[in-house]
Amino acid sequence: MTRKPLAATLALGMGLAAAANANEGMWMPTQLPELARTLKVAGFKGDPKQLADVTAPPLSAVVRVGGGTGAFVSGDGLLLTNHHVAYGVIQYNATKDHNTIDEGFIARGRDDERAANPDYRVLVTVGFDKVTDEVLKDARGKTGRGYYDAVENARKRIVADCEAEAAVRCSVANMYYGSDFYRIRQLELTDIRLVYAPPRAIGNYGDEIDNFMWPRHTGDFTLLRAYVGKDGKPAPYSKDNVPYQPPAHLKMALDGPREGDYAMLAGYPGTTYRLRTADEFANQIDTVLPRRVEVFQQLIDTIEAVGKGNADARTRYASQLQSLKNNRKRAAGELEGLLRSDAKAQRAADEQAMLAATDASYKADIDALFASLAEERAVGERELLVGLMSSQTQLLRSALLLERLRIESAKPDAERESGYQQRDQALIEGVLKQVQRRYDPTVEKAILTALLTRYQQLPDDQRDAHYDNLFGRTPAELAKHLDELYAQTTLGDEAQRLSRFEAARKGGFIESDPLVSVASALVMAQLNDERQSKERQGEQLRLRPSYMQALFAWRAKQGRAVYPDANSTLRISYGKVEALHPRDAVSYAPVTTVAGIVEKNTNTVPFDAPKPLLAAIAKGDFGSTADPALKTQTVNFLTNLDTTGGNSGSPVLNAKGELIGLNFDSNWESVSASWWFDPRYKRAVHVDMRYLRWLLAKVYPAPELLREMGVPAE
Amino acid sequence: MTRKPLAATLALGMGLAAAANANEGMWMPTQLPELARTLKVAGFKGDPKQLADVTAPPLSAVVRVGGGTGAFVSGDGLLLTNHHVAYGVIQYNATKDHNTIDEGFIARGRDDERAANPDYRVLVTVGFDKVTDEVLKDARGKTGRGYYDAVENARKRIVADCEAEAAVRCSVANMYYGSDFYRIRQLELTDIRLVYAPPRAIGNYGDEIDNFMWPRHTGDFTLLRAYVGKDGKPAPYSKDNVPYQPPAHLKMALDGPREGDYAMLAGYPGTTYRLRTADEFANQIDTVLPRRVEVFQQLIDTIEAVGKGNADARTRYASQLQSLKNNRKRAAGELEGLLRSDAKAQRAADEQAMLAATDASYKADIDALFASLAEERAVGERELLVGLMSSQTQLLRSALLLERLRIESAKPDAERESGYQQRDQALIEGVLKQVQRRYDPTVEKAILTALLTRYQQLPDDQRDAHYDNLFGRTPAELAKHLDELYAQTTLGDEAQRLSRFEAARKGGFIESDPLVSVASALVMAQLNDERQSKERQGEQLRLRPSYMQALFAWRAKQGRAVYPDANSTLRISYGKVEALHPRDAVSYAPVTTVAGIVEKNTNTVPFDAPKPLLAAIAKGDFGSTADPALKTQTVNFLTNLDTTGGNSGSPVLNAKGELIGLNFDSNWESVSASWWFDPRYKRAVHVDMRYLRWLLAKVYPAPELLREMGVPAE
């Protein structure tokens, strides 16, 4: 079988037209020269070739920060990211006298810039190289677990070789589901300082109520600065360090966005599923999401029912309940969006046409892939239930953690399962300690009753014999077993948990307890599931590339390029500033103004706009940052750019490549976009850089920083 | 003092320009010829003089129905009103086999039209005559209670004389707060039949969730038919009755509304406060509404706190709690709107300018009016608290009702206070019976503790000595009194209440009970308050006309006509189809389409669109009722017409006087419009007649009715 690399991308190089949704796509920068024609049609004024190299300007200004993205905005390492991405840094610098969260922070000169928490990192990409052959060399000819292990071992070896160089962090990214692998080398900057943060009531105005909402009025930005040793190399915090000179920095635009303007964005989107098979789409829509909604709702009802007569239990489970409600809402929203977009039928029709046109040489692999995915689907409910039994309980989770920790700790640290290594032990200890505040035996038994009753109803071939033995086959047996278990276990006592933790982390014998005995059997089932899962993952890693090749060929026929699903590597999206028509008769303008801050203000969290901000709005002194058409100060804007989680803090650029915005959220209607991009509803929400400039000029002044960014200081 | 009648209206006759808000105003039809110029500028194509006579076409087609408005739409008495105005009629005709609410109803021919509940009435106005001199003749020279009684007696006498004619119902309407009085003669039609009602999921699609909301997708209409005896005179239901031939009926338009189109509406708006004094505005905004929000919230918190540990109490008080929450929301919404419109400052500036320009002859009366209103304000909190002690309790309310019933029943029926006459006794008995399902002693004591604690904190001159004696002056005394009272009273027992009811309705002795003794003292305080209130009402009735004259003169100088505050008499509003921009970056189109029905549909009440409707939408066969520009079927539309409660069922007419819509709601942003008309936010929500025509043509067909209304039947 001959693999044609990125056939679809090349097709565009042959001059074919772009897809219907010109704004869909999280492109690898290396793909952009191929998209030159559509970029130009979309309005881009620069040279697409300049965007192809992630290690050269301007993309070398775009870096990973915390769990999101950031961009250098001065030659002296000044770094722009979201308030919520820098939240830990702001919180870390709060003191009794200065609540940096509520009041914000403005450094009085560079000497006053405050060190971030020591584990805060900024990663600057310095290398991006294809290593597909090296990764797959040993895997070829193998199947299943053998394929999986060969790939994993190759990846670990490449990372270890790469990191032999000091202060470089390396990783191997998997593109197109095993079709291609890239080695990414990143400079790890470890001295990051807080320079400017607006008050919470600006940086997080609206909080959870406005989260996912548009129109939006949030100044979700913060300025940091990266420092390095005097030798220019990464170094931990030191007074003697000097500002980092980044390989590039972005130029702040003087004009702002208008409806229809070209816009583009660079960042590190986390995970998407757009290239999954039609069956995976159908399963997500027909089964996975409805099941999640149903099970989460059942757990919500269960906890609320017990809580009704039990104020103490209500308090202990308040945060867990809120989290379940958020998860339920998110799953329901994703389902609603996928149904609205008719994603299942569209993906199915697309795949059917693709398969009809596919070269016979891929057919066997694709059929085998479908079979492996069907096996995976079959265990979906069991995996959900088993996962929830651990994540939604306190005592059972403790017992499972202790038992697994004991097993893993008997191995050399490097061979232990991730999550049970030396560095994970503090986290495990924390979980064991928090039980005291979050546990109520009646609630935990009710949760387990709900989950295990569902487990009992799984088909015979889906149940693990360990569960049948431990909990019986009927509701009555289950109730009896749970009552006995929770009456007898001593794990409700913190000292009992912590003494066993000390034993387990040494890989030694754990003192007996009924719940630990149960956990011991359940971990057997867990290990068995993990083995089967890695076997399937190996097969899919081996087989998906054939599906991808079929897709590339099909897209090439359509004249469409294919971007890889998001995987936390640097991507570029392009599109335009665009209004949203979410429902019949409802229109949202793509730019908001300070009038909305006043309208939303209630003087109560989360709509407690700071007095200086309200006064400045009332004064109306917007100067050069006012929008010429709207005659007032803008706040946020909306584009149709393709984003997902991880794009927080992504810089938004105009047609000339100048910085006009800072990405910080999406609209609720696009919560399903991780699977399906619907151009009617997919929007990204950005801070207008003119709002940042106005705040720094007139409200909480920092004229030096404006000058450093090369924009007017007043 | 010389009274110049309606000076401001005459000013327009002199050719002065209209006010800034051309669409503000609930005009008496007699005023319309004076507004001819502005009506023409607004786009009206007809002759304004034709709109002046409420007893001639077209206004004689507009009638009172239930608590709202309706209009004849055929020469055979076919009557169009809202589904919610005819709700009782639809419900009355529900049977075990045919749930007319859920399934709707279509009469198979006239023989199948179903009689309404016997108390359902349609009132056709046949006379509207000024009787100011007759009403005020005896009052002149009197003050206070004397003035009040003279006016009331004159009104009763005029009504009695008028109603001597059979089947005519008469009333005397007070215009401009005692400046003018009109005798209204109305034909009372008593045989009303149900002709066509859509299913609830069309007629009330969205229910409470969509109430006050825009965009809206509700087919809130029903068709009735009025019948009379063979002699053409009103008669109770009889098989032999014949369809009523109304003095006029409205012609259904073939075209629909478009943004910017002229629109007008006729109906019976209930109550507005727009001509109140600046101090009354300030008091409403600074005191009345914040106090209502605060007290309602306190009662909500009180009931919820007791309910937390008491599931039974939660059930018993669920409906009361919901009603308190609605009242709190409504008051908060009204306050928010008045603050947003800056109504207090605007009204104050207007009044100040008026007073500066006012003829000295009115000054003394106006000062005396302000003094009387200040007295009324002073008792505002007491009246609120005393009202809530009765309306929010079960046992205390029962005792108060029994004691007052006993006192009133000793008088001849005609002299009894309204609410305690013969015809009210069934209602009182009902209240006494429902206690059993709605009473919990802990909750009632908590509610009274909250209200009486506030009462204890009133200034000395505001507290009635009866309260001090009964409940003490400190929280501890209050708690002791309430505990004893509720421990000892026997009124928690239904038999105890009903036996006393039998005694009270005869005006006889009521068996003693601690709570009845308390009620006996509180009714003394109540009667005292009522005497003072009537004294003040008399003074205000005497004095407000001077304030009105000053206002007329001031508006005449501004070139503005003055409409009387709404008082359930026939009024006309005119304006246009207009979009709404409720908040920064949010726009609502003025016309909705069936796409919104599908978007909102969840298959669950209240968004459970009927399958035949969804199928018809999917089929897309909209024929002649489709909007030519939108290329689809419209549902509801929005105008800037001036409306308030009572305008439900008002016909909406186009520039040619044809029927284009049926009013059924307002938007939430205009909940404060009963005090202040803000053209930015005030909108009225209507059913597009094309939606009605489409439903009758294609979805739940009734071609005969379409033919009867003179529009295409397909």
Image (tube, coloured by chain):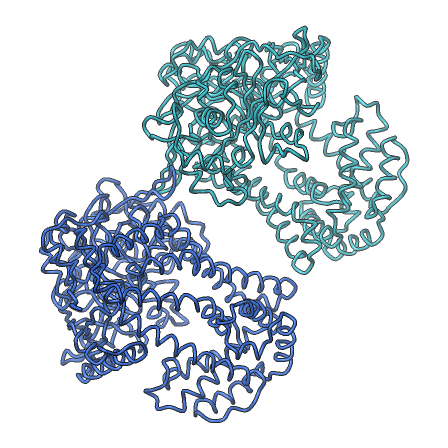
Chain colours: A blue, B cyan
Instruction: Find residue A360 and report its horizontal and vertical position in percent.
Output: 22, 62
Residue lying at 63% horizontally and 69% vertically, measured from the top left: A475
From the viewer's side, name the closer residue of B179 and B65: B65
Which quadrant of the rendered structure holds the N terminus of chain A? bottom left
Locate residue A257 relative to residue A454 in the image: left or right.
left
Which residue extends farthest top?
B231
Residue lying at 52% horizontally and 78% vertically, measured from the top left: A465
Residue B292 lies in quadrant: top right
Q: Is residue B311 visible?
A: yes
From the viewer's side, name the closer residue of A662 and B618: B618
Instruction: Find residue B607 and report its horizontal and vertical position in percent.
Output: 50, 42
Q: How many marks?
A: 0
Residue A102 lies in quadrant: bottom left
Q: Is residue B670 visible?
A: no
Instruction: Find residue A566 and report its horizontal and vertical position in percent.
Output: 27, 63
Instruction: Find residue A628 and report its horizontal and vertical position in percent.
Output: 21, 42
Residue B653's place in the image compared with A109, above or below, is above
Residue B669's place in the image compared with A710, above or below, is above
From the viewer's side, name the closer residue of B614 and B568: B614
